[in-house]
Image (spheres, rainbow, N blue to C red):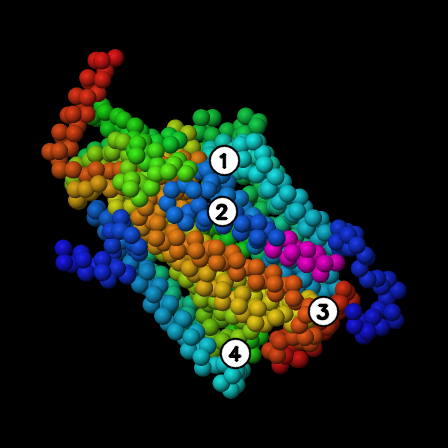
Amino acid sequence: MIRKSIMSLLGLLLASTASADWALNMPRGVTDLSAETYGLHMMVFWWCVAIGVVVFGVMIISLFMHRKSKGAEPASFSHSTVAEVLWTAIPVVILLIMAVPAAETMVKLEDTRDPDISIVATAYQWKWHYEYQDEGIDFYSSLARPSVEARRKQSGVDVSTVENYLLDVDRPVVVPKGAKVRLLLTSNDVIHSWWVPELAIKKDAIPGIVNETWFKPNEVGTYRGQCTELCGKDHGYMPIVVEVVEPAAYQAWLDARKDGDAKFASAQ
Amino acid sequence: MTTAVADAHAAEDHDDHGPTKGYKRWLFSTNHKDIGTMYLIFSLVMFFVGGAMAMVIRSELAVPGLQFVHPEFFNSMTTMHALIMVFGAVMPAFVGLANWMIPLMIGAPDMALPRMNNWSFWILPVAFGILLSTLLMPGGAPAGGWTMYPPLILQTGDAFPFLIFSVHLMGISSIMGSINVIVTIINMRAPDMTLLKMPMFVWTWLITAYLLIAVMPVLAGAVTMLLTDQFFGTSFFLAAGGGDPVMFQHIFWFFGHPEVYIMILPAFGVVSEIIPTFSRKKLFGHDSMVYAASCIAFLSFIVWAHHMFTVGMPLTGQLFFMFATMLIAVPTGVKIFNWVATMWRGAMTFETPMLFSLAFVFLFTIGGFSGLMLAIQPADVQYHDTYFVVAHFHYVLVPGSVFAIMAGAYYWLPKWTGHMYNENLGKLHFWASTIFVNVTFFPQHFLGLAGMPRRIPDYSVQFADFNLVSSIGAIGFGLSQLLFVAVLLTAKRGEKATDRVWEGSHGLEWTVPSPAPWHTFTTPPKARIANESFE
């Protein structure tokens, strides 16, 4: 708790939660791979800072020292093979240092084998449909009612009073903590994209194609994301909410869901 | 026109003529300087049209909730803003600079194909007239993004065929302009000017012209397939008919990635002219700059799928595109190091063109850093289609390409008008632009990392703070550009410019009078003379 408050006080360059205002950085996320992705992001960032300090440092020194108003006389050199070989070779080495861990993480990201749960997510303009394979349940997930009312042009609603404005749905995806969830993505109309930053997963939902991706959440919680491929007028209004719960709670949710669906079917 | 040139014409050129009067001078122009001027003015007009659309976008995004426009119109604005800025502002501005300066820099009397030059310019106002007219059509202007991904773009209303036709026209104009540049450079250089002696601006434009010829037909093919999918029953990109929507993205980005370098290589050229002038030192490593630019051009053809890391490609494909993309950092780094080495131990002064060029080096490098981050595929999964990407490409396009165009305009303006522009006004324009461009685009990095997708008209309240900062910056940047108009309107009030204009300038364009007479180099100059005048 103390650590958390210090972090939010320091703010700058430290990971802050995605929902905080003035958030500066990517969330560390709640899967092993999201933490790896965050690590890659920070590694490349610090390399860029280091290179920036050297290049901008030399440039700034030059800007102050080598100005005509200080009586600088221009030198006549216009070539140096040693320097040019060095500043071609050194970046290659730095790139290799970045490329190896990046490739390792990429291989893991693509490994969708042996899932515990498979969910087929089908995108529509402008909502998501989820089908839990092997469980026989499916449902649509659309923008939650309070946001729908507030989002209209000049609706008169102060959107800051709407809880999770534009990031809440009527029926979230529920998954158990610690399970490897495989997501099968496709679309019924145009291309959409499924993204939840805390899970570090983004994959396009494309008509005629089934894409695969996976995540294995380590922490219980509610994680919010949005469609990230322009899909028409309500592109900004098709959020994604994933609720990660304890396995027992997941089982209870499944049972209630099946029960509810059965009641609904018998009422027809 | 100076007496020396007039006398020379009177003595040996019975075909001498000045510009015709009235609209015919411009409509039927075959003069590279007049056509260059028209290109530059056209691109400035488009810069303000596209800028006005950016103001609509940033106004709507200033605070959460929908205030001014409906989502569909918002999407039209982002789509049209991009198309106009890319094809209407940045590309024609560089063609304008090429028209004006390449013949002067290589000692040619005009472009090689003057009538085609006229044609390639006059197509543009037609193309953009068509594109802008879609704003008034039923169904609105195109709203599927400038990338025109199907199937979404096929949902465009009556505007659809007009969009396709205007893109075709822009492509034809670019191809004709490029043919002209290549033929001029290859055939009309001053006798002593070998290829490796050419100024960097000429070199980068030669490479750019080849890129344009290579990829504009690819774009034309892609949009033609969209057209036939829509109207003639084909299914190139429609899954229901056995087509593949992802194939469009591959074809589009095979055009789109070289297009990125089409918009930055001439900028490299402009900056490579200006930094040596105001450092009073030769460009460091001229030949390695040429090789680096060629290297970038080659690599630009084999990295396209890094725009598509989330479409679901085979692992090996993604690995290849990640490594190839990272490799671009090497030649780009060489260029930046060479500019810094050019400044090192020079004797610098900081006139407006130099200020814009220095800001270019700083801020383009920042855009390069975020580009390197985007190349890392697992991280790109998080960045893709967020404001982080928006921040990245605006850093390389606004303080990148646009600042280089501004730098070039200030640098050569005295040669065009014969008068020094108002330096104080220029510096004010520079500082306002530089401060506001960073206020606008730097916070967008944070927005993207925090999870804000691009191309959305409204957002969750957690993104409110930085969006407001960005919008304030954008309005400031937009207003700052009016200072540039003020500079242009007062451009002829300054003191008379000398032939050389700048103390440290070198090259053939500085051997002709200021303003450059209507006809220059009717007899080829000796490049050696110009080089010696510098050394």
State the CA–CA distance, disc 1 to disc 4.
50 Å
Q: Which of the two marks, 1 or 2, is nearer to us in this view? A: 2
Say which amino acid is labelled 4.
Answer: Met
Depth order, front residue of B298/B467:
B467
State the CA–CA distance, disc 1 to disc 2.
22 Å
Say which amino acid is labelled 1.
Answer: Ile
- Identity of the residue drawn at 51% across and 56% down: B478
Task: Place residue A244 in its image quadrant.
Answer: top left
Q: Which mark is residue B80?
A: none
Q: Residue B400 colored magenta?
A: no
> Which residue is under mark 2?
B56
Say which amino acid is labelled 3.
Answer: Pro
Subunit ID for the residue under disc 4: B
The quadrant of the picture occupied by the N terminus of chain B is: bottom right
Residue B468 visible to an observer of this rendering: yes
Subunit ID for the residue under disc 3: B
Sequence-first tag of 1 and 4: 1
Do the numbered discs 1 and 4 sit on residues whose CB atoms are within 8 Å? Answer: no
Say which amino acid is labelled 2.
Answer: Val
Sequence-first tag of 3 and 4: 4
The image shows residue A96 at horizontal and vertical percentages of 34, 60
Q: Is residue A118 above or below residue B126?
A: above
Q: Residue B41 colored magenta?
A: yes
State the CA–CA distance, disc 3 to disc 4.
26 Å
Q: Which residues are magenta?
A: B31-44
Q: Is disc 1 in the same subunit as disc 2?
A: yes
> Which residue is under mark 3?
B515
> Which residue is under mark 1?
B153
